[in-house]
Image (cartoon, rainbow, N blue to C red):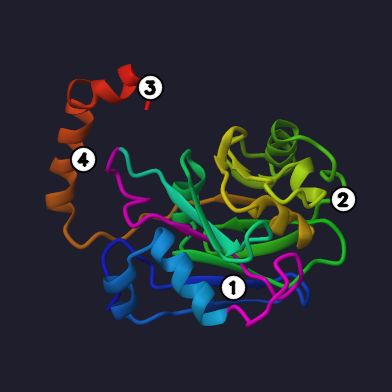
Amino acid sequence: MTVGGSWGKFLHVNLSSGEHWIEEPPDELYLKLAGGRALVAYLLLRDLPAGADPLGPDNLLIFAPGVLQGTSLPGSGRHGVGAKSPLTGAIASSEAGGWWGDEFKRTGFDALIVHGQAETPAYLWIKDGEVEIRSADHLWGKDTADVEWAIQGELDDKRIRVAQCGVAGENKVLFANVINDINRAAGRGGLGAVMGSKNLKAVAVRGRMRLPVSNRKRTTPVAKWLADNYETKAAWAVNMGT
């Protein structure tokens, strides 16, 4: 059995060895932690070696979509990014909006755990359950917009979503962000520096898999009500600028 709203799969990628593998966690873990920040914290506490250098290969970089991402529910577009912070030395977890998390969830995974450190600049290409480590030599030193457009052109798909470190992350600036969809930021804890330290320029995702939901007959009317009432019920959020 797989808990509704999940695939029952975490994707692990080791940049040092080039290997990747799939973890199938128990349903109890989903019922307890769901996704996002809670899952990031759990995985770091479980797998991060004691005393790991935040900018070394032993640190982990984790991407975890929110529990409702990949569904039709409006307002569910937040994913978590986490690692041991090079800025504080503690666990860092930051959230970002945009389309990246939703697209990642539709690739068939509930979390991405990046291990190790690539010898040369690389990016991950994840599509419908498949993963590939590709060279990012030609992307290193470029800004976020140019990188996203270059990857979309290289893979011939404008609907690809990209999370990446910018030039600050490449240079391990301790407050560097992880940027997705060109201008959405996981801005806390220096996670962009962790990404840069791994020589991981970007994670490009494209998903066309339909997420299994426990009771679509109940969730579809809720999604429709939210869509129909958003402008009136949440107008204060737009008007107040929050």
Instruction: Please tell me whether mark 3 or mark 4 is closer to you in this view.
Output: 3
Mark 2–mark 3 distance (CA, rounded to whole Å): 39 Å
The three-letter amino acid code for the residue at tag 3 is Gly
Q: Position of residue 33 (x, y in %)?
A: 33, 69
Disc 4: which residue: 223
Q: Are marks 2 and 4 in contact (CB under 8 Å)?
A: no
Instruction: Say which of marks 2 and 3 sits in front.
Output: 3
Rendered residue at 82%/49% (across/down)? 171
- SS under mark 2: loop
Give the structural element (helix, strand or loop) at label 4. Answer: helix
Do the residues under discs 2 and 1 have CB atoms within 8 angstroms?
no
Marker disc for residue 241: 3
- Mark 1: give few (<14), some (14-19) or many (20+) Cα within 10 Å: some
Dot 1 or dot 3: first in sequence order is 1
Q: Quadrant of residue 212?
A: bottom left
Do the CB atoms of the residues marked 1 and 4 lie less than 8 Å apart? Answer: no
Look at the magenta stretch and give its main secondary structure.
loop
* The C terminus, quarter of image: top left
